[in-house]
Image (tube, rainbow, N blue to C red):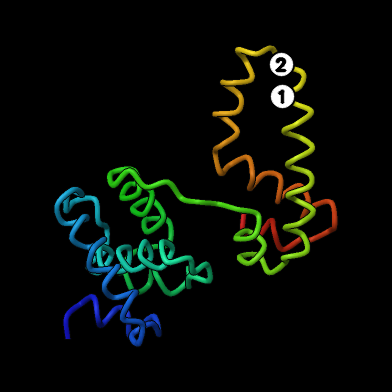
């Protein structure tokens, strides 16, 4: 069995042919655009290709604990490698409040975070001049800001588990 199929089986995703095909595409891109030394584990290229394919197909319940183990590296090394690969392949991670809600198990909080975000952006931008508005709008496109709004909502409603993840 080839390594990509083996990793898919271990991740309990072996029956998804669309995922396999997409993972092969990402693996090909990784092979041509990402230096081999970037990958920190023996299976990290395969697992990262699968994760990129998984996300690109709109799935958001990725097994973030099994992935580094299967890749053969620490969770920190896996995350660092994933960030480097995304950068080298010019991929932006799409973070929405819905995906954050699913990830942290609270779709209700996603709605509150979206409301907070909309209010914050509107009020903040209205205080700026036209030139600053363009710059700030671009800065606010970063996923970091949405994650921060979600975190603030979680803290406001008393979700203490959020600190363990962050």
User: Which is more toward the observer, 111 or 86?
Assistant: 111
Task: Please state the horizontal and vertical placement of residue 28, each as a whole percent of the image.
Answer: 18, 60
Q: Is residue 58 above or below residue 155?
A: below
How many numbered discs sit on the rendered protein?
2
Say what secondary structure mark 2 lies in.
loop
Q: Quadrant of residue 43?
A: bottom left
Q: Is residue 9 left or right of residue 123?
A: left
Quadrant of the image for the N terminus? bottom left
Q: Quadrant of residue 41?
A: bottom left
Around disc 2, counting alpha carbons within 10 Å, would you say few (fewer than 14), some (14 to 19), or many (20 or more)? few
- Circles 2 and 1 in contact, beta carbons < 8 Å: yes
Query: How many angstroms separate mark 2 from mark 1 (CA)?
Result: 5 Å
Q: Is residue 114 above or below residue 136?
A: below
Q: Residue tagged by mark 2?
A: 128
Residue 104: which disc?
none
Task: Please state the horizontal and vertical placement of residue 53, each as a whole percent of the image.
Answer: 35, 65
User: Which is more toward the observer, 165 or 49?
Assistant: 49
Around disc 1, counting alpha carbons within 10 Å, would you say few (fewer than 14), some (14 to 19), or many (20 or more)? some
Q: Is residue 23 above or below residue 110?
A: below
Say what secondary structure mark 1 lies in.
helix
Q: Is residue 38 left or right of residue 55?
A: left
Residue at horizontal 37 percent and vertical 47 percent from the top: 91
Q: Is residue 151 left or right of residue 123?
A: left
Q: Quadrant of residue 144?
A: top right
Task: Please state the horizontal and vertical placement of residue 106, each as a whole percent of the image.
Answer: 73, 66
Residue at horizontal 58 percent and vertical 21 percent from the top: 134
Residue at horizontal 56 percent and vertical 37 percent from the top: 141
Task: Please state the horizontal and vertical placement of residue 92, each as a whole percent of the image.
Answer: 42, 46
Residue at horizontal 60 percent and vertical 33 percent from the top: 140
Q: Is residue 144 above or below residue 14?
A: above
User: Which is more toward the observer, 147 or 16?
Assistant: 16
Q: Residue tagged by mark 1?
A: 125
């Amino acid at each position: 069995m080839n390594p990509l199929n083996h990793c898919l089986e271990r991740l309990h995703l072996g029956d998804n042919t669309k995922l396999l095909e997409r993972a092969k595409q990402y693996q090909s891109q990784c092979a041509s655009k990402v230096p081999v030394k970037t990958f920190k584990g023996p299976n990290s290229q395969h697992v990262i290709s699968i994760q990129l394919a998984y996300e690109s197909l709109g799935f958001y319940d990725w097994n973030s604990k099994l992935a580094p183990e299967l890749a053969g590296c620490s969770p920190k090394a896996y995350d660092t490698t994933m960030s480097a690969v995304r950068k080298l392949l010019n991929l932006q991670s799409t973070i929405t409040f819905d995906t954050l809600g699913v990830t942290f198990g609270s779709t209700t909080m996603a709605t509150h975070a979206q409301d907070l975000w909309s209010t914050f952006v509107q009020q903040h931008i209205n205080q700026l001049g036209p030139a600053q508005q363009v710059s700030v709008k671009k800065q606010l496109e970063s996923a970091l800001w949405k994650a921060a709004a979600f975190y603030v909502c979680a803290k406001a409603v008393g979700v203490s588990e959020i600190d363990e993840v962050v």
